[in-house]
Amino acid sequence: MYHCHFEDVEHVQMGMTGIVFVRPTQDGSSVGGFTKFAYNDGDGSTGYHRHFAILLNEFWKNFHDGDRDIQESIATDYEPQWFTLNGRCYPQTLQPNDYNGENSGITTPNPNYDDAPDRSQPNSSLVQVNPGERVLLRLANLGYQQHAVQLPGINLHVIGQDASLLRNGTVDTSYRTNTLYIGPGEARDVLFDAPGYSALRPSGSDGRGPYNVYYFKNRDWRRLSSLGAPGPGGAPSGMMTEVRVYQNDLPDQEYVSQTYV
């Protein structure tokens, strides 16, 4: 993770953050049936087909209002009203990226440039996969609160923590779980195997065809709201996105967190 180290408490809250990951030298070699890996594992155990990076954070309205008005905020009063994945709340987490020809449609007028459209949250959190694919999630928390996130219906395999492979010499210390606890400043590297598509499961359809939907979300219902209120139609908001498993094959991923909507 990176963030500014000058007045960092202010700048992290203002969104000057991001994820940095270093690709292993093993990438491009065929090991264990994979050619892309989270780590130099030597055995292909961290191999994957698709790769998604998601940054967890919170947004405290009082801090932003105080900063605008040149007023001090008291950190012990911290009580965020929005909980975000890649800077967005559900359902905007499902909108496409704002690069490589994709367009989220999420814009705000920038008064410094004659109200030209400003795409200030360009990264989607939508996870689109084919059945049977192994998926790598790079998760990092640069908020000030611990978060517990889940992906009900899909088992999670934690293979890395804070940029280190979970292995003690030759002993595998990775673990499987249905709930991830990620504290402030912490990161997890997580693999999961996409289940098969079934018309009997909860599903939807978009421009790529029918899909099953699994919700990657905060387990705390209070963090599935925005400004204390649910999303459109009473649906959840806040720290949630979707994992979509498609009936029709998606093309190979060309870059991290690519979206196809």
Image (cartoon, helix red, strand yellow):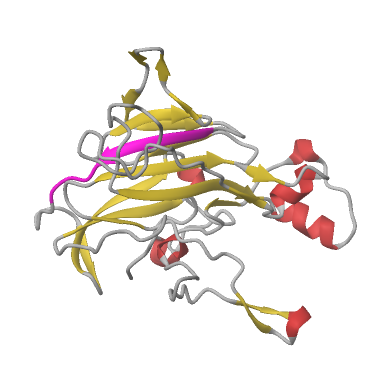
Task: Residue at 43% x, 56% y: name it.
Answer: 125
Residue 88 place in picture, x, y as percent: 53, 59
Image quadrant occupied by the C terminus: bottom left
Q: Position of residue 236 (x, y in %)?
A: 42, 55
The boundaries of the magenta stretch are: 187-196
Q: Quadrant of the N terminus?
A: top right
Q: Residue at x 22, y 45 (%)?
A: 194
Q: Residue at x 65, y 38 (%)?
A: 144
Q: Quadrant of residue 112?
A: bottom right
**Magenta part mainly helix, strand or loop?**
strand
Q: Position of residue 85 (x, y in %)?
A: 50, 52
Asked if the stretch drawn in magenta spans residue 188, the answer is: yes
**Residue 158, percent across and down?**
37, 29
Near-viewer residue (159 or 177): 159
Q: Is residue 32 left or right of residue 50?
A: left
Q: Is residue 63 shown left or right of residue 226?
A: right
Of 113 and 27, the residue lying toward us: 27
Residue at horizontal 78 percent and vertical 42 percent from the top: 5
Residue 180, by quadrant, is top left
| Residue 106 within the segment the image draws in magenta | no
Q: Is residue 66 above or below residue 164?
A: below
- Left or right position of 84 against 52: right
Q: In the picture provided, is 128 more to the left or to the right than 7?
A: left
